[in-house]
């Protein structure tokens, strides 16, 4: 990373922040001590989503983040961990999908990550994902599911058997 003030290449990162389509870093030049912000768009490749009906839509980082947040609603998981998982998911999506990715694969990548972090979030996501038609109604279904759990705090048996199917 070249310093915009003196052109030297040595800098230290003072702060990193993940934003919806990239990584924002606050840096300090080790030569001239100038401070500047870099914006790394490595994760913002234009990714296109292939839906089950074969139509395509631009990948929305925002919607992905929203759906993951909903899955973690009221769960005792640190925001920091959720953000890290979200970042890993995005990295994986860009690795798997060159510039196009199928909705099924997106769902699979997400649940694989959630599984590591929290079983309830994982089950919520996975149980909605089987009926995944599009991200918008997906988010709606997740919201309904999270609401239901607030009342009953139980996972319906048919959803558990669905998870077994995914694992096998
Ligand atoms: Zn400098």
Image (spheres, rainbow, N blue to C red):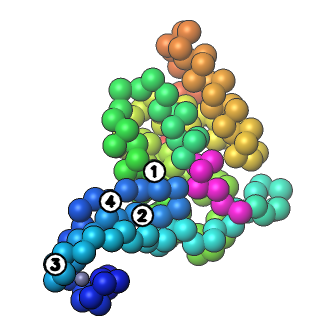
Above-or-below relation of 121 to 61: above
Quadrant location of the N terminus in the rendered image: bottom left
The alpha-carbon separation of the residues under discs 2 and 3 comes to: 21 Å
- Tell me where residue 164 appears, x and y as whole percent: 51, 36
Above-or-below relation of 17 to 75: below
Query: Which is more N-terminal, label 1 or label 3?
Result: 3
Q: Do the residues bearing badges 1 and 2 touch, measured as CB atoms within 8 Å? A: no
Mark 1 within 8 Å of ligand 1, using the beta carbon:
no
36 sits to left or right of 20? left
Above-or-below relation of 39 to 151: below
Q: Secondary structure at mark 4?
A: strand
Query: Which is more N-terminal, label 3 or label 4?
Result: 4
Determine the residue positioned at 55% across, 33% down. 70
Determine the residue positioned at 82% across, 62% down. 55
Mark 3 within 8 Å of ligand 1, using the beta carbon:
yes
Q: Nearer the viewer, residue 8 or 132?
A: 8
The quarter of the image that holds ligand 1 is bottom left
Above-or-below relation of 85 to 164: below
Residue at which label 3 appears = 30
The alpha-carbon separation of the residues under discs 4 and 3 comes to: 17 Å
- Chain part drawn in magenta: 58-64
Query: Which is more N-terminal, label 1 or label 4?
Result: 4
Residue at which label 1 appears = 86
Per the image, is 104 magenta? no
Q: Secondary structure at mark 3?
A: loop
Residue 163 seen in the figure: no
Mark 2 within 8 Å of ligand 1, using the beta carbon:
no
Residue at which label 4 appears = 16
Q: Do the residues bearing badges 4 and 2 touch, measured as CB atoms within 8 Å? A: yes
Crowd rating for badge 2 (residues with CA inside 10 Å; few <14, some 14–19, many 20+): some
94 sits to left or right of 52? left
């Amino acid at each position: 990373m070249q310093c915009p003030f003196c052109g030297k290449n040595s800098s230290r990162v003072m702060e990193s922040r993940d934003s919806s389509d990239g990584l924002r870093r606050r840096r300090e030049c080790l030569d001239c001590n100038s401070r500047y912000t870099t914006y790394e768009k490595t994760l913002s490749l234009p990714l296109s989503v292939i839906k089950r009906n074969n139509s395509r839509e631009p990948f929305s980082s925002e919607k992905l983040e929203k759906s993951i947040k909903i899955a973690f609603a009221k769960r005792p998981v640190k925001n920091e961990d959720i953000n890290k998982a979200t970042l890993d998911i995005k990295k994986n999506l860009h690795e798997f999908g060159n510039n196009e990715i199928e909705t099924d694969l997106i769902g699979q990548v997400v649940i694989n990550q959630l599984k590591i972090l929290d079983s309830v979030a994982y089950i919520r996501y996975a149980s909605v994902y089987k009926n995944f038609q599009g991200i918008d109604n997906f988010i709606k279904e997740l919201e309904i599911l999270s609401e239901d759990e607030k009342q009953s705090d139980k996972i319906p048996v048919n959803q558990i058997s669905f998870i077994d199917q995914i694992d096998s």
